[in-house]
Amino acid sequence: MRPLLPTLALLVVGSLAFAAEKKYELLPDFIKPAEGRKTIGNGHGEIAVDSAGLIYVSVQEKDAGIQVYDQTGKFVKALKLPASLHGFVIRKTDEGEFLFAAVLNEQRLIKCTLDGTIVMEIKADDFPAAQGKTKVKNGVDANALKLTNCDVAANGDIYIVDGYGKSWIFQFDKTGKFKQVFGGPTQKVDGKAFANTHKVFVDNRYAPARLLCLDRGNNRMFHLNLDGTNPLMIADKGLRNPSSASFHGDLMCVAEIAGRVSVWNKEGKMVAELGANDTKGQTNTPGVKPDAWRTGIVTSPHGITFDGKGNILETEWNQFGRVLRWDAK
């Protein structure tokens, strides 16, 4: 594969391994931080776009769990949500459009209106004890959940993954009632148990829909049926630790924390590669300072989304906060 050229033109490469090349153009310096700030703030979460085109970016700051930007990248407001909000999605339900989020330090799921009002939660104690508890030295049960992400199926079922724990995937109904748990250290896919399954997403490109698992610890991504059965491998070679994904039409974009954004078609073939970074010490770390950032070259992609037009927005694991955007051509 040819090396990625750090230019302001088309930051995309092709090779014979690509099914059909898709083209994207970098929109440099897209995000404009709030007045008085040089960067958006500590990032270790996700990015999403609502039906109106507003962009939501999670930041680890008190009383500002999510920052909201308009389509031009201008800061609009901050939502007073938990600072440890890690993974979230914006989904339409029968009741309207809501934000569903996994709150890492509090080990709960929250459902919010788009102004940040919490209307439902699934608390740590609502998870089954066998997967959610562990014995500590003094004999007291302590919560062992480390929830990293969630998504919502068409019937309202909520899937939540214990991505920084044992990689259990919990399924609840739309009211927050527990249904089942799968994945984790006891279920194997191609001989390997789930490991650091960082995020999961409902993939509605297929009928019936599938559950996408970004099994970062094994550097692979695969599908399951929505009941947790019938694993289908998408890729387990050549990846850079897939951490998040989003869908648009037949395409899937993937944030790979070891230094790449990739785009895949419905057949599981990579059709574009964006921002690849091969510089030692600049990927899979939150410590890359702004003066070391290079235009169009990623550091540690952690969250990603398509907008309604098929453009790609990526947010990084970075203590200063960084968002990159590529527009579809």
Image: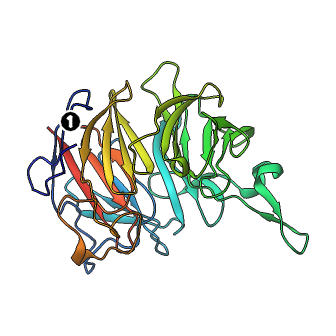
Q: How many marks?
A: 1
The residue lying furthest to the top in this view is 207
Image quarter of residue 290: bottom left
The residue lying furthest to the bottom in this view is 36
Quadrant for the N terminus in the image: top left
Side of 193 relative to 6 (left or right):
right
Q: Which residue is mark 1?
A: 15
| Rendered residue at 48%/67% (across/down) | 80
- In the rendered image, residue 310, in percent from the top left (x then y), is placed at 26, 38
- In the rendered image, residue 136, in percent from the top left (x then y), is placed at 84, 69
Quadrant for the C terminus in the image: top left
Whether residue 48 can be seen here: no
Image quarter of residue 141: bottom right
Image quarter of residue 187: top right
- In the rendered image, residue 173, in percent from the top left (x then y), is placed at 67, 36
**Above or below: residue 180 compared with residue 229:** below
**Above or below: residue 199 compared with residue 328:** below
The residue lying toward the viewer, choosing from 51 and 232, is: 232
Side of 4 relative to 131 (left or right):
left
- In the rendered image, residue 35, in percent from the top left (x then y), is placed at 25, 76
Q: Residues within 10 Å of mark 1 (few under 14, many from 20)?
A: few
Tell me the amino acid under the disc marked 1: Ser
Whether residue 293 can be seen here: yes
**Above or below: residue 236 compared with residue 274:** above
Q: How is the image coloured?
A: rainbow
| Rendered residue at 60%/29% (across/down) | 226
| Rendered residue at 27%/78% (across/down) | 37
The residue lying furthest to the right in this view is 139
